[in-house]
């Protein structure tokens, strides 16, 4: 016999635990029996599962991705420039618009489309992922100590932040409404936020609890060691790639106070070298590191390859041993190498191009400094 | 080892730091890669780099306590072909919350400085070109708790 009533908070918590695989076999059997009798419980379970899947997909993008994912991302970028109003209702669209919002680069049409996405309940998870990413980034860059980044993050379009804050406020008020703990002013505030009659607070509470479970999944995922490791490595790689590109374009000496650049990720380079935002992970997933040398071997097109080769031989046979030998003894003991040497490069300060990458066999971090043979500064 | 100075009172952990100076040469692309047998444990990793031979030229082993630093002399060739004395300054900064050992590695004359965290017994490499002959110098830095 089926019964029609809205799931209460305990039942919603049970559904969340069921999806997380945390129920005992006895509890799971009981829940499954309930689900067979309660269409409303089935609907709530489906809605919760859809939101969590969407959230997880956003927080754990694969490095290679599928061709469909890549096509969607490309289409979103193109459509956002050409006709934002026609952006498809897809995660790629929202992700691209939020990227633009973080950089303060949204056109009015793009901002309007982003507002429409944020108003749609199906996209709540996407918006919350964005908010979680901003929170993680704020904590990572220690805003008090880096005013340039603080200013850039605080120029996020106000309507985006306001919407997220409104949703959070609505959660809190609806929870209080169900327990009849709201003052008259708070009830009016809740009606203003949700545009609904206070008499229908049960439905609001269900919606707020669904999104609360999504937010909980978001926070748990963002705090996981795997997520932080991925974002940290990818973020450091992105920062170094950006720094290397900029130093090649402007070979002026780097000072301890780098100038502010319009790119969000370029501004992050003045921080600790960490970037814990999934935005950086998505960007850095496409970064490719190659080992470059300022001195390429001679080719057959060189005017005098013989003279060059002679110079090389002279250097290696005569000069190098004098420079390298000194009075140090060369040890005979072999290096005891760990199987996994994964290291973290927390900061790099250099006046020349640097590249950071890891070897395949033992994950040895290699920091390549292009100017290692530069003249001593000031001489 | 040239010098050491205490930067903090009452150091706790002590670390054995090893620095191996490796010269890499480009050579013939079709030739097999030759690795000094004293670097055989690094061979697989060194083969990721676009050099055809790797020779161990120098090494230092030193003991540094948390909060202290040591200066290790390293060979660096300037573009004018003259040898220059450089010092790689290694400073120990204790452990990360996750347990990795934190060190700063710097070559002051080149205004290069990096802060890294390596696992206990882990190795990190800092490298760069040498002169204009297509060769490179690599500093393989290994740190472990004593």
Image (spheres, rainbow, N blue to C red):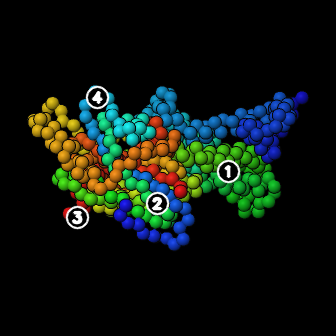
Q: Which mark is residue A194?
A: 1
Judging from the image, what secondary structure is the residue with disc 2 in? strand
Q: Label 1 crowding class (10 Å Cα cut-off): few <14, some 14-19, many 20+?
A: some
The residue shown at (48%, 44%) is A336
Reading the image, the residue beneath label 2 is: B63
What is the chain letter for disc 3?
A
Residue at (49%, 51%) from the top-left corner?
B118
Q: Chain of mark 1?
A: A
Check the residue under mark 4 and report the chain it is in. B
Disc 4 to disc 2, how far (Cα)? 39 Å
Which labelled disc corresponds to residue B31?
A: 4
Does residue A161 sit above or below B4 in this rendering? above
Q: CA distance from mark 2 to mark 1?
A: 65 Å
| Residue beneath the point at 21% across and 37% down | A297
Side of A128 relative to A369 (left or right): right
Between B3 and A244, the residue placed more toward the observer is B3
Query: Mark 4 touching mark 3, by CB under 8 A?
Result: no
Q: Secondary structure at mark 3?
A: loop
State the CA–CA distance, disc 1 to disc 4. Answer: 72 Å
């Amino acid at each position: 016999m089926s019964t029609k009533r809205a799931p209460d908070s305990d039942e919603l918590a049970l559904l969340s635990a069921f999806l997380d695989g945390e129920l005992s076999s006895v509890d799971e059997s009981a829940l499954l029996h309930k689900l067979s009798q309660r269409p409303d419980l089935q609907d709530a379970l489906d809605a919760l599962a859809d939101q969590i899947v969407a959230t997880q997909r956003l927080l754990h993008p694969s490095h290679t991705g599928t061709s469909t994912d890549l096509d969607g991302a490309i289409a979103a970028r193109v459509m956002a420039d050409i006709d934002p109003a026609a952006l498809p209702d897809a995660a790629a669209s929202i992700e691209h618009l939020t990227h633009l919002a973080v950089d303060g680069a949204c056109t009015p049409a793009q901002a309007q489309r982003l507002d429409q996405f944020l108003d749609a309940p199906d996209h709540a998870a996407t918006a919350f992922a964005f908010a979680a990413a901003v929170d993680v980034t704020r904590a990572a860059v220690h805003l008090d100590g880096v005013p340039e980044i603080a200013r850039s993050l605080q120029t996020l379009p106000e309507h985006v932040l306001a919407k997220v804050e409104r949703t959070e406020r609505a959660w809190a008020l609806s929870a209080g409404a169900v327990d009849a703990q709201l003052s008259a002013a708070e009830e009016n505030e809740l009606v203003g936020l949700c545009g609904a009659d206070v008499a229908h607070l049960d439905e609001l509470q269900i919606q707020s609890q669904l999104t609360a479970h999504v937010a909980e999944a978001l926070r748990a995922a963002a705090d996981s060691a795997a997520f932080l490791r991925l974002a940290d490595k990818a973020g450091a790689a992105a920062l170094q790639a950006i720094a290397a590109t900029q130093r090649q374009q402007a070979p002026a000496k780097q000072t301890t106070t780098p100038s502010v650049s319009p790119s969000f990720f370029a501004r992050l380079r003045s921080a600790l070298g960490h970037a814990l935002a999934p935005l950086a992970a998505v960007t850095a997933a496409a970064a490719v590191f190659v080992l470059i040398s300022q001195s390429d071997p001679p080719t057959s097109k060189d005017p005098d390859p013989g003279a060059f080769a002679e110079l090389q031989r002279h250097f290696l046979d005569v000069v190098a041993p004098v420079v390298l030998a000194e009075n140090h003894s060369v040890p005979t003991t072999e290096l005891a190498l760990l199987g996994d040497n994964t290291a973290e490069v927390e900061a790099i300060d250099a006046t020349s191009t640097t590249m950071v990458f890891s070897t395949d066999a033992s994950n040895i971090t290699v920091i390549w400094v292009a100017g290692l043979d530069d003249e001593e500064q000031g001489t | 080892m040239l010098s050491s100075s205490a930067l903090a009172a009452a150091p706790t952990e002590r670390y054995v730091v090893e620095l191996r100076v490796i010269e890499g040469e480009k050579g013939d692309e079709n030739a097999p890669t030759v690795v000094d047998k004293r670097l055989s444990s690094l061979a697989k990793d060194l083969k990721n780099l676009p050099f055809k031979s790797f020779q161990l030229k120098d090494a230092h082993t030193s003991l540094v306590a948390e909060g202290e630093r040591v200066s290790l002399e390293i060979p660096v060739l300037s573009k004018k072909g003259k040898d220059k004395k450089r010092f790689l300054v290694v400073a120990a900064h204790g452990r990360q919350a996750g347990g990795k050992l934190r060190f700063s590695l710097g070559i002051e004359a080149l205004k290069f400085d990096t802060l890294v965290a390596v696992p206990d017994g882990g190795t990190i490499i800092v490298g760069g070109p040498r002169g204009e002959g297509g060769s490179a110098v690599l500093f393989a830095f290994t740190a472990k708790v004593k």
